Image: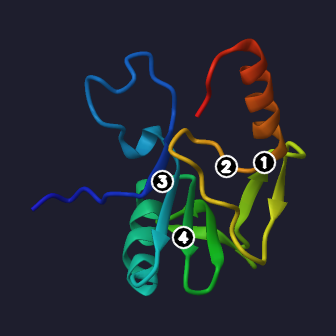
Amino acid sequence: MSSTVIRDVALVRYRADRYRTGHPRAADTLLVIEVADTSVESDRQRKIPLDARAGIPEAWLVNLPEDGIDIHREPTAGAYTTLRTAGGLEPQFSDPRRNRMVRSSGPRPPSLTSAGRAPGYPWQRHRRRRALASGSRTG
């Protein structure tokens, strides 16, 4: 059985060999992110203390049931000394009509077509008109 704990996301230091010669170690790790749905308490009691003991500068626990993030920082003597909780997560999506991010408490944006474009947006209709005028076809 391996003692390696798998993380959902890890931000590691740049290395010229891009870790081809070996996996990142705790000293290479700047931030770990654990996303938890049913394992929040287990991750909080088991994985976060392991990160602190390893000296990882920052660990986030994304708590899906409570729509929050526990941000652990400053490991000292095997424990994180700073805890900040960010809450009230809301889904976000990109609004191509205004080229900005929009918070959404309502319905999700329209699904993308197989070509990766949302049907019906004005910018897509403009592309279609321009393509038709030039004699080419788009999806």
> In the drawing, what numbered circle is on residue 135?
none
Real-space Cα distance between discs 4 and 2? Answer: 32 Å
| Closer to the camera in the image, 119 or 66 | 119
Find disc 4 in the rendering and name its residue. 61
Q: Are marks 1 and 4 in contact (CB under 8 Å)?
A: no
The mark tally for this picture is 4
Q: What is the x, y in percent for residue 118?
A: 67, 49
Q: What is the x, y in percent for residue 98?
A: 90, 46
The local secondary structure at tag 2 comes to loop
Real-space Cα distance between discs 1 and 2? Answer: 6 Å
> In the drawing, what numbered circle is on residue 118?
2
User: Which amino acid lies under the numbered mark 2 shown in the image of this protein?
Assistant: Ala
Which badge, 3 or 2, comes first in the chain's sequence?
3
User: Which amino acid lies under the numbered mark 3 shown in the image of this protein?
Assistant: Gly
Indicate left or right for 76 with 20 as reference: right
User: Which amino acid lies under the numbered mark 1 shown in the image of this protein?
Assistant: Tyr
Mark 3 residue crowding within 10 angstroms, few (<14) / some (14–19) / many (20+)? many
Mark 1 residue crowding within 10 angstroms, few (<14) / some (14–19) / many (20+)? few
Find disc 3 in the rendering and name its residue. 55
